């Protein structure tokens, strides 16, 4: 089925457990500006889902445990300027997920584990297949974390990132895992 959420202002909501298995779902020009929005346990297994020109500017948005196993998901020209977006526990095993022209200028985007105040940790994202690309993405001010994420396959590509002045926090110190492509060192100097 096709769904159109273009231009909607979300100040809360629950898409937890939703199945995006065909058709087109559009969140283009939506604003996540307050409250909590849940995509926990959502399944992205077919079709196309667009978060293009979306503003994450004040909400807590959770993709925890979401499964990206097929289809295409686009976060093109999205702005992460405030609030928190969690991909903790998400599984990237077959989809093509693209962050093209995205600005990470404020707030927190977490692909790593989450520590709860009451104790315990929810595991990091799992990259075991598919492709996740950050093309022309500007890492200039947000805290983007991959600590606790697991890399066992697929492709996580930062090689064509734009501004790399505030790069993500990774769980390794020297050599990235197989399938992870970082910008060349000379590209770091230009960013």
Image: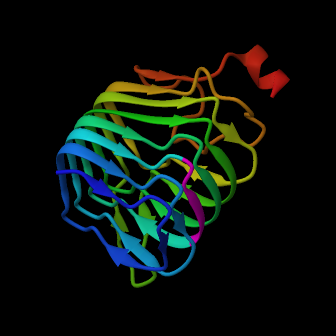
Check the image and report above or below for 1 versus 47.
Answer: below
Q: Residue 85, how many percent across, how many down?
A: 49, 61
Front residue of this view, candidates 129 and 16: 16
Q: Residue 79, how many percent across, how many down?
A: 63, 52
Check the image and report above or below for 57 versus 27.
Answer: below
- Which range of residues does the magenta coloring cover? 53-58
**Displayed quadrant of residue 69:** top left
Front residue of this view, candidates 77 and 132: 77
Give the color scheme: rainbow, by chain, secondary structure or one colour. rainbow
Q: Residue 28, how many percent across, how many down?
A: 47, 52
Q: Is residue 2 left or right of residue 107?
A: left
Q: Is residue 169 left or right of residue 52?
A: right
Question: Total number of numbered labels?
Answer: 0
Check the image and report above or below for 184 versus 174.
Answer: above
The answer to whether residue 57 is magenta is yes
Q: Residue furthest right?
A: 190
Front residue of this view, candidates 1 and 34: 1
**Displayed quadrant of residue 100:** top right
Instruction: Quarter of the image for the C terminus: give it.
Output: top right
User: Going 49% across and 48% down the picture, which residue do you hit?
Assistant: 147
Q: Residue 61, how many percent across, how many down?
A: 45, 67
The answer to whether residue 155 is magenta is no
User: Going 42% across and 49% down the picture, which residue do you hit?
Assistant: 148
Mostly what secondary structure, the magenta segment? strand
Q: Residue furthest bottom?
A: 118
């Amino acid at each position: 089925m096709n769904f159109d959420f273009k231009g909607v202002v979300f100040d809360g909501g629950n898409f937890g457990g939703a199945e995006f298995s065909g058709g087109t779902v559009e969140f283009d020009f939506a604003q996540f500006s307050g409250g909590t929005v849940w995509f926990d346990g959502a399944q992205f297994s077919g079709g196309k889902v667009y978060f293009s020109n979306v503003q994450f500017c004040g909400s807590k948005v959770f993709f925890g445990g979401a499964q990206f196993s097929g289809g295409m998901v686009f976060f093109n020209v999205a702005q992460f300027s405030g609030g928190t977006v969690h991909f903790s526990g998400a599984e990237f095993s077959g989809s093509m997920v693209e962050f093209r022209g995205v600005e990470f200028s404020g707030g927190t985007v977490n692909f790593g584990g989450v520590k709860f105040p009451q104790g315990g940790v929810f595991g990091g994202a799992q990259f075991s297949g598919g492709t996740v690309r950050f093309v022309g993405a500007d890492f200039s001010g947000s805290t983007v974390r991959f600590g606790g994420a697991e890399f066992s396959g697929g492709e996580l590509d930062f090689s064509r990132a734009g501004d790399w002045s505030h790069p993500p926090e990774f769980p390794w110190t020297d050599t990235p895992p197989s399938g992870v492509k970082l910008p060349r060192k000379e590209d770091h100097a230009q960013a």
